[in-house]
Amino acid sequence: MSGEIRTQGTQVYIYDKTATPSADVKQIPNVVDIGEFGPQADDIDVTNFDSAAKEYLTGLADNGELTLQLNLDPASPAHRLLDANAGKGERFKFAVCLSDGTAAPTLVSTVFTAPTGRTSYLFEASVKAFRRAIKTNDANRVNCVLRISGAIATTWKA
């Protein structure tokens, strides 16, 4: 192997600023799939009458949406938090931490920080959807769609 990282052991966290008596970091349990995410820039068309072909500038990056597929756990405080905030526009901080380490993100005062012992991605997002899928002979599944707002901060394993 040349440094590949297994997906097994990847964890997703949410910074719950609404928790009482104080804010905390919750792991989102039972994640079975994390959809694609990351920057894709817009095209700005600057073609004019003197152009020999279409001309473009690269626009701002859009980090898009991230879909988490979950096996629903009705007792999970993180699942309840996601469900309660679906479609409301409230932004939360999230971390996707790969399996090249086991440390969790930390919270000091109100600063949500990536662990240095594993590769991770921190971003802010609102919960756009928390949609259930109930099928015969299957687990109760949820597709949780997060709309990323702003940049994604990447921390590589130290």
Image (cartoon, rainbow, N blue to C red):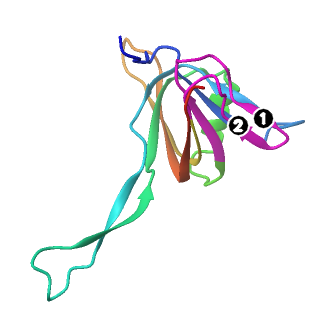
Q: Residue 106: say if magenta.
A: yes
Quadrant hosting residue 139: top left
Q: State the residue in front, 12 or 80.
A: 12
Q: Earlier in the sequence, mark 2 or mark 1?
A: 1
Q: Secondary structure at mark 2?
A: strand
Q: State the residue in front, 78 or 11.
A: 11
Q: Are marks 2 and 1 in contact (CB under 8 Å)?
A: yes
Percent x, y of residue 20: 86, 36
Q: Is residue 150 above or below residue 31?
A: below
> What segment carries the magenta color?
92-120
| Residue 104 appears left or right of 123 | right
Name the residue carrying label 1: 107
Looking at the rendered structure, the kind of residue marked 1 is Leu
Image quadrant holding the C terminus, namely top right
Percent x, y of residue 157: 57, 26
Who's the residue at 66% across and 45% down the image? Answer: 92
